[in-house]
Image (cartoon, coloured by chain):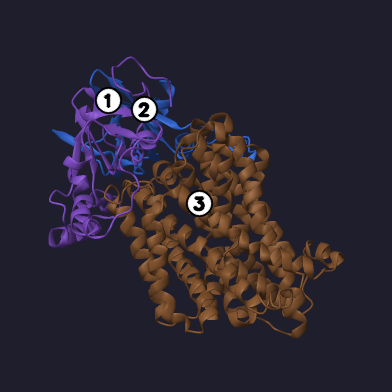
Amino acid sequence: MKKAATLALGILTSVGGFFDVGNLATAAQAGGVFRLQLLWPLLLGTLLVIFLVEMSGRFAAVTRQALPDAIRTHLGFATWLVPFLVLSLVHFLVLGAEIGGICFALHLVTGLPTPVWALPVAALVWLFLWRASFSAIENSTSLLGLLTLAFVVAAWQHRPPTGQILAGMLPTLPHHDPARYWFIAVSLLGAVISPYMFYFYSSGAVEDKWDDSYIGVNRGVSVIGMGFGSLISVGAIVVAAVVLAPRGIQVDDYHQAALMLTTAFPFWGFVLFAASMAIACLGAATEVALSMAYATAQTYGWNWGEDLDPREDARFCLMYTGAILGSALLILFGVDPLKLTLLTMAVNAAVLPFVAIPFLLLMNDRKLLKEHRNGWISNTVTLVVVVLSIVLAIVSIPLLIQGGS
Amino acid sequence: MKTVHFELLLGRKVHDSEGRRVGRILEVHAEPEGKDCVVREYLLGTAALLTRLGISAERLLGLPVHREPVRVPWDQMDLSDPERPRLRCSVEELTRNK
Amino acid sequence: MPRQKENGKGIPDELELARDILDQQVVDREETKMGRVDGLVLELREGRPPRIDHIEMGAVVLARRLSPRLERWVDGWRRRFGVRKVARYKAPWSDVQELTSYHLKLDVGALDTPTFDWERWLRDHVIQHIPRPLKGNGEEGEKKE
């Protein structure tokens, strides 16, 4: 029973880390501009992310160490410092984007301007982390996250052309706007393979006290959890392709994305969109904020854990408090949530080598993982991620400048 | 008491008694001895880094490399100037003794 | 990690200093996480092998690993605004109780050491003033195994 409940960690990781504001925004753009042609980066990303999540869970189960912890221990402080600082900065922006997503959802429902919601939303996210234990966060978010299935239901109701869906799963060259095409493709990958997911998932596995006996469960959780996120994202692309593309809506603004569900659900469409977006972003915001606190506490060896009384890990708690407050200021001062999101997804892709290379090193440590170290399949996938991540790092910034606007 | 900071020693280039470069100190082996823990040997060169990471390049990349780190016994390492560690012998003598 | 010898302590009979000790998570006797092995000091002895004298913990020790200038800068900040009175916490090797692949256990109480100065200060000056949740209660929390 306890092990079945670990699925909650998978779904939470997935709702927060997979289907988040980045996925929603990039999926809406992909579907709106290129219809079903850009399903392939999503599927490629899903495949890679399943492997990476499985590895981070296996690593935590065997070594009782979360990834940032192990990276500092085994690769050393000097090697880890620059990736750590860069990733912290990126995560700060991602957190801002997620908080912006919740604020926008509230704006959609209430009509009040988005920035007005920045501080109340920050307070809500903070209160959630401050009050709730780790399992409460897992269970409530993964349960509420099922609401995002609305995108799949909507996609189903539109009876999308199966042939085109299958065709979109294979990479093809764009018929128009090549810069935009590749920019969205890279952003989709960046949105799917979010660095914080791995830090979060492995820290969560340590919080849930996994041991070797969880290796099998972990494999299932990675596939089902990430499969769930992928299904929602495919649903979002299909809906955008069917609803937005024929009307020539290219989603330069979240307001346009909000039309996505109104055809399938004429009356509830707006509210459902707002609720799905709010839940997905809330899950992601808690995940990013915790992930930042985990990474910092583990890097410096502070006491950490969502199940501890904040008196026992004051520094850990203040870390996520500061992160939430700081990134909410971005929204308060009027940064556009969609622009922030698209920027951070491209940057996510650019910093992937910092995530992928430590994976390759740690997962092959025979002294740590012994018989559980990577086999040739996992290593091949990790090598593909490393090579791909380096390519993405090189192309993402020029594409951001060329195709981003 | 003469001390040396291990964290600063790590990664330093070592030269042999004739001034030739031998490699960087990338790992140090030690053993408990009574209540103490004492240094046995210093490991130099890229192969030492792979040892430290527990990685075999052969397994990972399929390259047939079997490079062994340069092992320097504690009594052959002169740390009187920790910024410029030197061997008390030449590289050839080091490998001949093995 | 190799098998452990009968040395009365949970210390393996073969150690790799960079891999096993430097940067390792340090916990106290209650297994509360108290920091990391930021520095490791060896004593050089005439005619005998060098021995580990103590481990060091603290931001200035970390800063020193990057550059001496950064160390002076960090120490300046600590003097002006820091809560921590002692820059470097030094734990003699004899305090080390256990060494595993995931932690190094010291026979001390974290709260009594300077490594917890900031933790204690934040608890007393910040956390204490915010209504706290009903979690932890010390029953699980600290012991993770």
Circle 1: is it few (<14), some (14-19), or many (20+) Cα within 10 Å? Answer: many
> Which quadrant of the figure has residue C8?
top left
- Chain A shade in the render: brown
Q: Are marks 3 and 2 on the same chain?
A: no
Q: Quadrant of the C terminus of chain A?
A: bottom right
Q: Amino acid at mark 3?
A: Glu
Residue, disc 2: C15
Mark 1 and mark 3 in contact? Answer it, CB < 8 Å: no
Circle 2: is it few (<14), some (14-19), or many (20+) Cα within 10 Å? Answer: many
| x 42%, y 20%: residue | C3
Label 3 – label 2 distance at C-alpha = 39 Å
Q: Position of residue C88 (x, y in %)?
A: 18, 46
Q: Position of residue C125 (x, y in %)?
A: 18, 58
Label 1 – label 3 distance at C-alpha = 44 Å
Mark 1 and mark 2 in contact? Answer it, CB < 8 Å: yes
Q: Nearer the viewer, residue C98 or A307?
A: A307
Disc 2 element: strand
Residue, disc 1: B37
Numbered circle sitting on residue A138: 3
- Chain C shade in the render: purple
Q: Are marks 1 and 2 on the same chain?
A: no
- Residue, far top: C6
Foreground tag (3 vs 2): 3
Label 1 – label 2 distance at C-alpha = 9 Å
Numbered circle sitting on residue C48: none
Residue B66 visible, this angle: no
> Which quadrant of the figure has residue B32?
top left
